[in-house]
Image: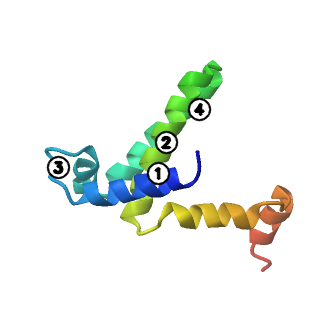
């Protein structure tokens, strides 16, 4: 597995965004707009948390995939490719989480 899976999925999402909403889940959600996509991300995040609390690795993996998929839909709606997210993660690699968080704070 590699990050090219995310790129291929993003490419598939891009194609399906232009499809007939009657034949594509992606197109159907796109037709409903960003708020509907974000609502789905929230629902999937909640399901992820519940699966984590259940402690079932298979269920957690399934819900993580749903969360990532719906996050990719929202990213696509806003013109952000997964490569940009991966680049941001790479930028943070090796940084202390506490130091990175402190650097984000507004000094004023």
Proximity of marks 2 and 1: CB atoms separated by less than 8 Å: yes
Residue where numbered disc 3 is placed: 21
Labels 4, 1: front one: 1
Whole-angstrom CA distance, mark 2 to mark 4, is 10 Å
Q: Is residue 20 left or right of residue 73?
A: left
Q: Secondary structure at mark 1?
A: helix
The reply to whether dot 2 and dot 4 touch (C-beta < 8 Å) is no
Task: Tell me the residue at 77%/60% (across/down).
Answer: 93
Which of marks 3 and 1 precedes in the sequence? 3
Which of the marked residues, 3 or 2, is nearer the chain's N terminus? Answer: 3
The residue lying at 54 percent from left, 24 percent from top is 59
Mark-to-mark CA distance, 3 and 4: 30 Å
| Label 4 secondary element | helix
Residue at 83% over, 60% down:
94
Height in image: 62 above or below 84? above
For residue 65, side relative to residue 14 (left or right): right
For marks 2 and 1, give the CA distance.
Answer: 6 Å
The image's mark for residue 49 is: 4
Labels 3, 4: front one: 3
N-term-proximal mark, 3 vs 4: 3
For the C terminus, which image quadrant? Answer: bottom right
Residue 3 or residue 90, whichever sits in front: 3
Taking the spot 42% from the left edge, 47% from the top edge, the residue there is: 70
Label 4 neighbour load within 10 Å: few <14, some 14-19, many 20+ = some
Q: Which residue is mark 2?
A: 67
Helix, strand or loop at label 2? It is helix
* Secondary structure type for disc 3: loop
Q: Position of residue 46 (x, y in %)?
A: 52, 35
- Label placed on residue 71: 1
């Amino acid at each position: 597995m590699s990050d090219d899976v995310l790129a291929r999925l993003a490419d598939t999402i891009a194609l399906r965004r232009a499809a007939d909403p009657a034949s594509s889940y992606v197109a159907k959600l796109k037709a409903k707009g960003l708020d509907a996509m974000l609502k789905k991300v929230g629902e999937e995040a909640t399901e992820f948390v519940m699966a984590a609390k259940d402690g079932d690795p298979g269920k957690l993996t399934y819900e993580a995939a749903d969360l990532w998929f719906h996050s990719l839909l929202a990213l696509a709606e806003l013109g952000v490719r997964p490569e940009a997210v991966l680049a941001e993660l790479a930028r943070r690699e090796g940084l202390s989480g506490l130091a990175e968080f402190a650097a984000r704070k507004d000094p004023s």
